[in-house]
Amino acid sequence: MAVRMLALVSDCYGMGGGIARYNQDLVEGLAEGGAQILVLPRNGAADGIALPAGIRQEPPVFGRLRYSLKSLWIGWRQGPFDVVFCGHVYMAPIAWAVARLIGARYWLQTHGTDVWESRPALRRRAIEAADLVTAVSRGTRHILLGWVELPPDRMRVIPDTVQDRFVPGPPPEALREKLALGPGPILLAVGRLSSSERYKGHEEVFGALPALRAKYPTLVYAVAGGGDDRAFLEQRARELAGDDGAVRFLGFVPEEDLLGLYHLADLYVMPSTQEGFGIVYLEAAACGLRVVGGVGGGSADAVPDERVGVLVDPSDRDALVAAIDGQLGRGRADPAAVEPYRRTHFAAAARRLLARLVDRGRRKRDAT
Amino acid sequence: MCGIAGIFAYLDVAPAVDRGELARMNVRMAPRGPDGSGDWFSADGRVGFTHRRLAIIDLSERGAQPMHSADGTLTITFNGEIYNYRALKAELEGKGYRFRSDSDTEVLLQLYADRGPAMVEALRGMFAFAIWDARARTLLLARDPLGIKPLYYADDGWTLRFASQAKALLAGGAVPRDPDPAGVAGFHLLGSVPEPFTVWRAIRAVPAGSTIVVDAAGPEAPRVYYDISQSLGRRAATAAGDAAAARRQLAAAVHDSVRHHLVADVPVAVFLSAGLDSGALLGTMAELGARDTLAVTLSFAEFKGDRHDEAPLAAEVAARYGARHVVRTVDRAEFERDLPAILDAMDLPTIDGVNTWFVAKAAHEAGVKVALSGLGADECFGGYPSFVDVPRSVHLLRPFRFIPGLGALARRGLSAAIAAGAKLHPKSAGVLQYGGDWAGAYLLRRGVFMPWELDGLLDPALAEEGLRRLAPLSHIAAAYQFGRPLGDFDRVAAMETALYMRNQLLRDADWAGMAHSIEIRVPFVDPFFLAALPPGNVLATIGAKEAVADVPRPPLPQASRNRSKTGFVTPVGRWLRDAGSTSGEVTFSNASRAWARRVWQAGWTGSAAA
């Protein structure tokens, strides 16, 4: 008998970004194991997307109240469901309510900053009520356990996964020309430039560039991605980098160029202190690019050892310069280090947790 | 009796086992096993076990650990003793299993091969062990029914680590030292840290009477195979004969348990006080044929020659049963000299354990490796004042619980009066609020500090979080709520066994004994023994705590019975009080409160904790 799961998520098919990608990987991994999954997203429509067997996605429902009512309605009318999966902690209270209403097990997924910041009592209760809580990293797990009481067996980790397309390849010289990056070395950062995400450490790297360019005069820092903070960061680059040519803002980079950019660059440098996981580090490493990440958050899970790179405290400029200089001298990353993060491992881990959850038996409707 | 530890990198992304980390864990447990040390790592580097050996059964190298099954698929690291291993071995041999050693460790391996994790239900003994099953790729962690042997684990979401001591996990270097508010609050409330909590958030105890299976998805929820309240409930349903029959049943149960606890390939000694329980153990040992048993008694220099000195009466009992008697005198100066070592050996904070430290030290000096202790007798025979006080409090004060807000109001008023100088014990403020409920009355009886006092002792946010996570009354109530409703005697017995005995007495016996490489065996802490006793209400009726004097033949002398009625005094309370740097009248309660502060201030969650 196939396991039936109702997935209440913020984003899944029809949306971009890390959480949407994670949710897609998760439901596909579970569906490959035979689970039947109905996805109810807050954002993004799956119109025109051929969904894998076993997965259906409802149209998105905007507005918290409407979403809550529809969750309850679907849970009640389209069941029975064995499991209610909640893809974002903001929706934990409604997922808890739906699971109680229909007597299903309740699985909550946490990512990173979603459990680091706001800690209202209702949310805490909704997390503690979960039969299974998964986090993308040990760092997120550790932080969450600092303010909720969950026994170890109910608080598991499923690390983010690297897409199979991220593999080593020759540097595309045409792209170097197109982007006018010069002979390098090229330091690369990829990600949204958001004023709410200044923890990513761009400014600290700008500040390290004068010292680095003293040794590597043609070194450039290529910052890929757009966002509301671009103007601010451009200004900071002018103030800190010491040379207008030292930082190149590439804006949004299309998927087809992103892989080439990883192959072209010499080092991935984003000393972020609050990554929930830091999937970009692994994508870079999977392409053979060594990584300088930041100490803090879940980055330690994406940069597990020296085969991938190092983590530094970005506020220590000398350490940052030394880390970048040291990594530039060590060649490419070892792709074997990334192998356990591939999708097959991820999907197997997710299926094991689902099987364990289902083995626990259904919740009693009056249980908390 | 040994020290065990291990690491299992269960998630694919986790790095292989760090051998240096495991070596550091092993070194931290060196006193637990002076007779040998061994390591084992799986071929793929994902699992590593380590072991410190105190050789008691099968002293040869064939008993060394970690031990593997003949086909190499099972590996065990084991701390403890299995008293019925010969019977289990015979049973397994009857099924065709072949053995290569005379050790109880190999019996565990074969029993697992035969029954899987359910094997624990057949074991009579004290144990904590881990078995790696290479075929199933699972790790089994198991702990004895009543929690005699400790076992802690730390799971970071990728890798699971386990060890006999929480401090060994910290010594490895990979486990964070963030405080666990529930454990910290629990220690201040009860004087010991209530399991499964420790004072470190990353470390938990494998609950007594539980197994945990760890596979590629991490640890499963602990599976409880033994619960004291359920066991007492079953016993209560058994038929009881008249008083004489009940006394015979009691004597038979003690004989059977002592006989099982004498299984060893080294001499077994006894910790002998002037009390009935340890005297009954020695007498029973003699009756069962043990000759020339070494009996170790603590004597305090402050009491030399006065009525509090236990040595003369213990000497009389030792002579009665033909034991060699060693009296070890301890004074305040030695306590002060040993205090740093005591705090270092103390695995989790506790307000007790000092007596055990010194008697184990004395035993070690006398060349002892194994000793029986009367620990646990008060829990099963109703020897504590709580067996009277708690039921009386509940029956008397229960009606006041139905007046909303009265208890809290009275507590606030009395607390204010105490703060203004009223000569009342701080706990007395909570009598109306807590005394009418079983868990509340137990907390009042056993508590060191009360919940409303924690704000003044700890960071208020930590205290609030600790109380929320621990939920002390629910935690206490869980000790007697599993299974059928219990009578008054059994209800208190369940709380004393699952809380005070498990979290304080047994844990203290482990760290204080192991610090001196002494295996402490506890015949009164044995599920088979408890089940063989008459029902709790019958034990209360026959006065089991005195009736135990008649268990051996010849029975204990009359002087021992008289002595048990006048009570026992040690100067340890005064030393603790002084070490806690407070002044005023010396009562055990005052001393406990001051000593609790002293112990906590030793720095548990700081960098020097391991």
Image (cartoon, rainbow, N blue to C red):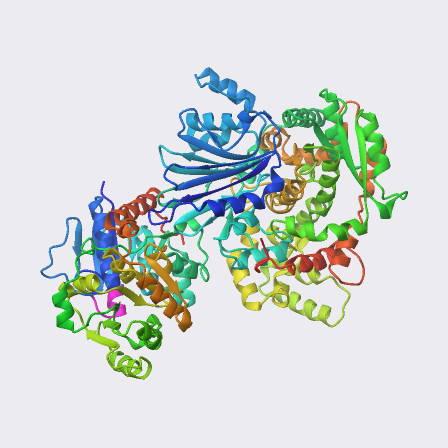
A63 part of magenta stretch: yes
Q: Quadrant of residue B534?
A: top right
What residue is drawn where x is 21% and y is 48%?
A31
The answer to whether residue B206 is visible is no
Q: Give the farthest residue toward the left.
A: A48
Where is residue B110 shown, x and y percent of the image?
A: 46, 25
Outermost residue toward the right? Answer: B305
Residue nearest the viewer, comparing A239 with B169: A239
**Quick one: quadrant of the N terminus of chain B?**
top right
Tell me which corner region of the image, top left, top right, bottom left or bottom right, holds residue A136: bottom left
Give me the residue at 38% from left, 67% from top.
Answer: A322
Residue B539 vertical position relative to residue B178 in the rendered view, above or below = above
Say if A251 sits above or below B82 in the image. below
Left/right placement of residue A85 relative to residue B352 reads: left
Residue A209: give x, y in percent of width and height.
32, 75
Q: Which residues are magenta?
A: A61-68
- Is residue B210 toward the left or the right of residue A356 in the image? right
- Asked whether residue B595 is drawn in magenta, I would say no
* Residue B461, visible in the rendered structure: yes
Residue closer to the observer: B178 or B536: B178
**Count of all numbered marks drawn on residues in the image:** 0
Give the main secondary structure of the magenta stretch.
helix
Q: Quadrant of residue B449?
A: bottom right
Q: Position of residue B366 (x, y in %)?
A: 75, 34
Toward the viewer: B12 or A134?
B12
Horizontal side of residue B433 vs B43, given as left or right: right
Counting from the top left corner in percent of width and height, residue B312 is at 86, 36
